[in-house]
Every structure is written in structure tokens, then in C-alpha cells.
Amino acid sequence: MIEHKPLYQAMISAVSQTLENMAFMEAMEHFNPKYEIPTDEVVCNSILINDPIQGEIKLAMSKSLLLKLTCNLFSLGEDEIDPSQMDDILNELLNTIVGLFMTNLLSDNQEYKIGLPETEIAGLPEIDASTIVWKLMTSEEDAIQIFATGASLVELK
Amino acid sequence: MKRIVIADDSATARMFIKRCLEIIGFNDAEIIEAEHGKQALAAAKEQEVDLLLTDLNMPVMDGETLVKWAKASPKLANLPIVVISSAGNPAKEKQLLEMGVHRVLNKPVSPPAMMDALADFMDE
């Protein structure tokens, strides 16, 4: 078993810091733990954690939140946004969140390796007993969900 | 006028870094964008470049390989390199500094962190 800090809080801090620094938005735990992003509205991507633990992290949010983030970050109007810019922002958010999550989670001298983010076409993942879910929202109550899978990652819970 | 290469596979990250540079006073710098290390290396070899900002996790050629190639090149050996990555941690930072990297910053980078990292460079 590797030395680590609390897993749940490591992710909350990573999402909060990323949204605050990149998009000037606050993130907090969702007031309704049963809330689900409607499946026809959801956009999702994933990244692999390869070392020293193996797992996969998925990030999901509504298309409307992603559009809002893209407009804010690129300083463009909704009609000027290219879908590739939205994909790129979603991927950069996940990349940054997972990097911070691993830094928050592991001890200082522990190296880690993560993969490159990929857009998920299948939408929200199936949730089973081996999935950890973080349900968060922005200060404007837009939902953000994070899913973690992989035995060696989940056992740190 | 400074000429700065930004290497990151994400257009969002490159835009974010450019915005930080503008905020801290590099408004008139010429920015050359590269999507991976190989592109950045080619740009830095072709032109006179003052600074290289690079991510680590990139396709084709990652940031660590880019640093090794730059440090092995007589033309680029003294080029200041700042790594801006989500894959950084104290152990990786130590390794990169030993390789000759000027500073290592974690994403999401902020203007104050960028200003601190580039303070020496701005005085030149």
C-alpha cells in the first residue's frame, strides 16, 4: 500500500483550485447528492492514471456549463465557439484536475504518471461498488461529476 | 521584443499561458505556439528565441524529451526553459531542475506564479 493523503478531499481541492484559477468559478459539493446530469445534456471525458496506482478518472458536466466555460475562457460569444474548443477545454480541465489530485493525494517524493485525456462518446459511466463518485457544483449550481475506477485507486478510499 | 515559444498540446493551455504573459507585462512579446515538443524544438532552432515554456505530457515529443534535446543542442543549451505542467511534483521538479530547467510551475498557472518564475528574465 502506498503512502497517501485523504482521497476524497484530494479531489475536491483539485477541482476547486482548477476552476478558481482557470475559470474564476467556485466549486463545492452538490447540495443534492442524488442529482444526476441529464444524459442528453452530458459531456464526458476520461484520463488514465498509470503509476504508482492504476485507475481511470472521468469528468462529466452539462453541455451548457462547458459552453459557458468556453465562452469565458476564450472571451468569445456562444455563436463563435467551435466544438473543438469545447473538447479542448474539457480535456485541459481534466488534465489539470487529475494532476492536482495526484499531487494532493501522494506524498511529496512520490512520482506519478498520467495519460492523455480522451473524449468519451458513451456518456456517463456505469456506477458500481468499485466506482467512487464526487458530485460537485459551481456557485451558479451547474453540476460537475467525477468518477474514479480501478482497484488500486479505489482501495485508497 | 522577446520571442517566446509555448509548447502545449492544448489550445486552451496555450491561450491561458499567453494571457498570463500579457497580464505580467509581456504584451509585445512574439509568441510562437507549438502543439508538441518536436514542433517547439524546430521553431527554437529556426529562430532566435528568448524563452521556452513547455508542458510535460504531450504527444509526439513530451516536455522532458524536449528539455533533453534542447540542452544537448549548442544553440539552445542556454535557452531558459520553464516547465508548466499538471504532471509535476517535488520529485519530478528536482529531476527537471537537475536537467537545467529554469523553473517548474504547476497547472493551473497564475499570473503571480508566472511573474515570480520569470522575474530574472523580465529584468534583462
Image: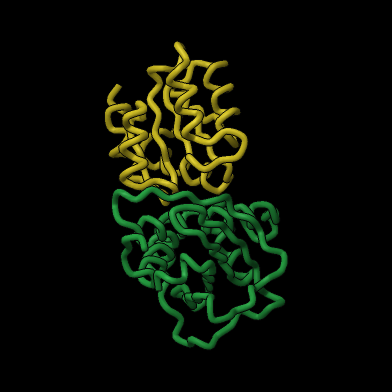
Chain colours: A green, B yellow
Give percent across and percent down for residue B104: 35, 39
For this rendering, which residue is in front, A68 or A4? A4
For this rendering, which residue is in front, A72 or A141? A141
Can you name the residue that lies furthest to the front here? A1
User: Is A149 above or below relative to A88?
Assistant: below
Count of picture labels: 0
Which residue is rendered at x = 45% and y = 11% of the image?
A: B74
Residue A66 in view, yes or no: yes
For this rendering, which residue is in front, A22 or A120? A120
User: Is A153 above or below relative to B84?
Assistant: below
Residue A99, by quadrant, is: bottom left
Which residue is rendered at x = 33% and y = 69% of the image?
A: A6
Residue A22 in view, yes or no: no
Which residue is rendered at x = 62% and y = 62% of the image?
A: A45
For this rendering, which residue is in front, B101 or B110? B101
Give percent across and percent down for residue A143: 53, 76
Lateral position of residue B105 relative to residue A146, left or right? left
Image quarter in which the N terminus of chain B is found:
top left
Can you name the residue that lies furthest to the top here? B74
Give percent across and percent down for residue A65: 58, 69
